[in-house]
C-alpha cells in the first residue's frame, strides 16, 4: 500500500471518549490537629464551579456532630475516634469526579496542671535562709518562674529549679511570692507568704564595780 506524503492526514476526535478530568479541589488546611475542646473546620475549594461533598475514608460515616455547607466541613465537640482521613469530592456537571484528602487528628483533652507551694506561709528570723518550693503535677514540660507580688526581688533571691531561696533574709524581703507555671494548656499561679522576724539588738551597758570598802569610806567621810 502506497501512502502519498503530500496528502493531508487528519485525526478526528473520538466523541465517545470520557470527558477530561479537571484539577482536584484544594483543602485548607491539608492537616488538622487539636483537642476535643476545639472545633474542626476544613475548607474545600474546587477548581471550577462544581458540587462538593465531604465523606470519610474507608466507608466510615461522618461524625454525628459534623456538618457541611458550601464545601466547608465543621465538626463540633470532636473525639479521638473522629481522627482519620476525610475526602472532599468535586463532581462536575459532566459527571467527572476529582477528590482530595485531609487528615484530622483529635487528641484527648489535657487536664490543667495542679500547682501548689510548700510551705504556703512561713516566718523566718532576720539573717537566716528562707525556702519555698513550687510543686506541679499533671503535665510534662512545664516552666516555673518565681516573682514577688508588686515588687522587685532582691539580689539575695535565688531560683534553683522549682525552689525559691532567699539568703540572709531581711525585713524588706517579707511579702507575697508568686510561682508562675507555663505549659501547653496555659499559665497557672500559686502564692506563698514569707514573714520576717526582726532581729533584736541588745545593747551592752558598762558595768559599774561595787566596792563595799569604798562605800564605808564614803559614809565615814560624810560624817
Image (cartoon, helix red, strand yellow):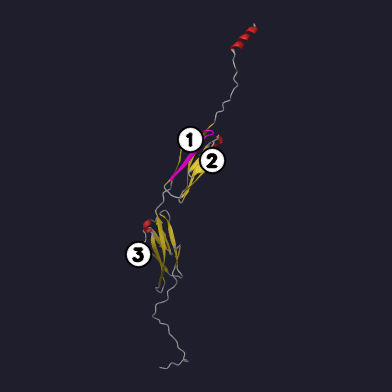
Which is more toward the observer, 212 or 190?
212
Please tell me the numbered disc located at residue 157.
Answer: 2
Q: Which residue is painted at 39% across and 63% down in the image?
A: 85
Q: Position of residue 22 (x, y in %)?
A: 44, 73
Residue at image mark 3: 58
Q: Which residue is painted at 63% across and 7% down in the image?
A: 220
Q: Main secondary structure of the magenta part?
A: strand
Residues at discs 1 and 2 in contact (Cβ within 8 Å): no
The span shown in magenta is 121-136
Q: CA distance from mark 3 to mark 2?
A: 60 Å
Which is more toward the observer, 125 or 13?
125
Q: CA distance from mark 1 to mark 2?
A: 16 Å
Residue at image mark 1: 122
Rendered view: 105 above or below 151:
below
Quadrant of the drawing holding the N terminus = bottom left
Asked if residue 154 lies in the magenta stretch, the reply is no
Amino acid at each position: 500500500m502506497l501512502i502519498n506524503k503530500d496528502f493531508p492526514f487528519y485525526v478526528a476526535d473520538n466523541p465517545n471518549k470520557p470527558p477530561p478530568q479537571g484539577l482536584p479541589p484544594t483543602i485548607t488546611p491539608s492537616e488538622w490537629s487539636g483537642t476535643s475542646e476545639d472545633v474542626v473546620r476544613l475548607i474545600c475549594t474546587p477548581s471550577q464551579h462544581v458540587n462538593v461533598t465531604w465523606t470519610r475514608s474507608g466507608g466510615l460515616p461522618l461524625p454525628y456532630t459534623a456538618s457541611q455547607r458550601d464545601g466547608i466541613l465543621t465538626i463540633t465537640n470532636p473525639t479521638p475516634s473522629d481522627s482519620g482521613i476525610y475526602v472532599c469530592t468535586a463532581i462536575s456537571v459532566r459527571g467527572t469526579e476529582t477528590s482530595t484528602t485531609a487528615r484530622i487528628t483529635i487528641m484527648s483533652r489535657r487536664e490543667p496542671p495542679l500547682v501548689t507551694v510548700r510551705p504556703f506561709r512561713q516566718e523566718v528570723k532576720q539573717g537566716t535562709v528562707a525556702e519555698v518550693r513550687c510543686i506541679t503535677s499533671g503535665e510534662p514540660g512545664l516552666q516555673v518562674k518565681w516573682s514577688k507580688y508588686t515588687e522587685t526581688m532582691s539580689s539575695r533571691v535565688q531560683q534553683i529549679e522549682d525552689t525559691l531561696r532567699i539568703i540572709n533574709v531581711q525585713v524588706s524581703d517579707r511579702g507575697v511570692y508568686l510561682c508562675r507555671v507555663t505549659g501547653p494548656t496555659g499559665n497557672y499561679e500559686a502564692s506563698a507568704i514569707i514573714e520576717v522576724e526582726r532581729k533584736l539588738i541588745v545593747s551592752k551597758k558598762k558595768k559599774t564595780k561595787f566596792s563595799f570598802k569604798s562605800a564605808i569610806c564614803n559614809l565615814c567621810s560624810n560624817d
